[in-house]
Amino acid sequence: MQARHLPASRGAFWIAAGFQLYRRNPPLLSMLTLAYLLLVVAFGQLQPVGPFLLPLFLPTLTALIANGCRAIDRGPPLPRGALTAGLRERRGALLRLGGLHLLGTFLILAIDILLQNGAPGSLLGSQDEGGAVANPLDEAELLWHMLRLLLIALPVLLAFWFAPLLTAWDGVPAAKSLFFSLVAVWRNWRAFLVYALTATLLGVVLPGLVLLLASLVSKPLAEVLSIALRMLLLVVFAPVLMTGIYQSYRDVFTSGERDADV
């Protein structure tokens, strides 16, 4: 399987194409995104096993959303079984991919703990005998820790970017799909950098500037805009970002109008 080498500008195209895809079927993409986020939250609440079960099913959930994107891209009507295409046939491989995701999560946590001198709870600070946090990290330390954690997790995130679709749609074995995904992302790192910067600009910087300007005019206006922007980010921008895996896969691993069929 050959990954195409794309110009940096394609990263911005993936965002634009995501908006176009969203306009073709807003209810479906919003529903899939909200269901995905709710499942992530639900797994997080199922302590202590939920956080360990989530990585097992993330590849399947990712493929499910990509199936929805592909069905919308191919045009109405939505075929029966389009959302689950490839999931049943490749469920074993997707679960193995989920197992590798779980191992990657453990590896990230282990490296992070080692970098914290073996103190897994240092992110929140030390606790006194009453269980209260005695020396919580200040904002600068917390930001540094989050950036460090992101850098540690980045190779795993990139390895799993294309892997669920390569496994579900192209039948690539779990371990090999991770390799193909990592190579494809590395070959197109400029496009992915532009994608990340564009997403940050539209999802963080611009809303922040709008709220800052609104707060200078009127505090009630800023509060109303804050609620409206949160709704827009959740209902519109989050689904657009969720199409990014599909758009980039279609761009990197396919050409013209050819799609990866199951």
Image: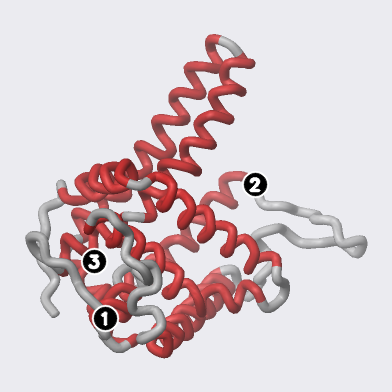
Q: Residue furthest left?
A: 256
Check the picture and name the quadrant holding the N terminus: bottom left
Q: Secondary structure at mark 1?
A: helix
Residue behind mark 1: 179
Q: CA distance from mark 2 to mark 1?
A: 38 Å
Q: Amino acid at mark 3?
A: Val
Q: Nearer the viewer, mark 3 or mark 2?
A: 3
**What kind of residue is marked 1?**
Phe
Residue 185's mark?
Answer: 3
Mark 2 residue element: loop
Q: Nearer the viewer, residue 99 or 239?
A: 239
Quarter occupied by residue 179: bottom left
Q: Is residue 74 above or below residue 158?
A: above
Q: Which badge, 3 or 2, comes first in the chain's sequence?
A: 2
- Residue of label 2: 138
Q: Residue at x 58, y 30 (%)?
A: 227
Which image quarter: residue 3?
bottom left
Crowd band around label 2 with a 10 angstrom C-alpha radius: few (<14), some (14–19), many (20+)? few
Q: Residue 250 in the image: x percent, y percent?
A: 19, 63
Along the line of sight, which residue is nearer the eye, 259 or 141?
259
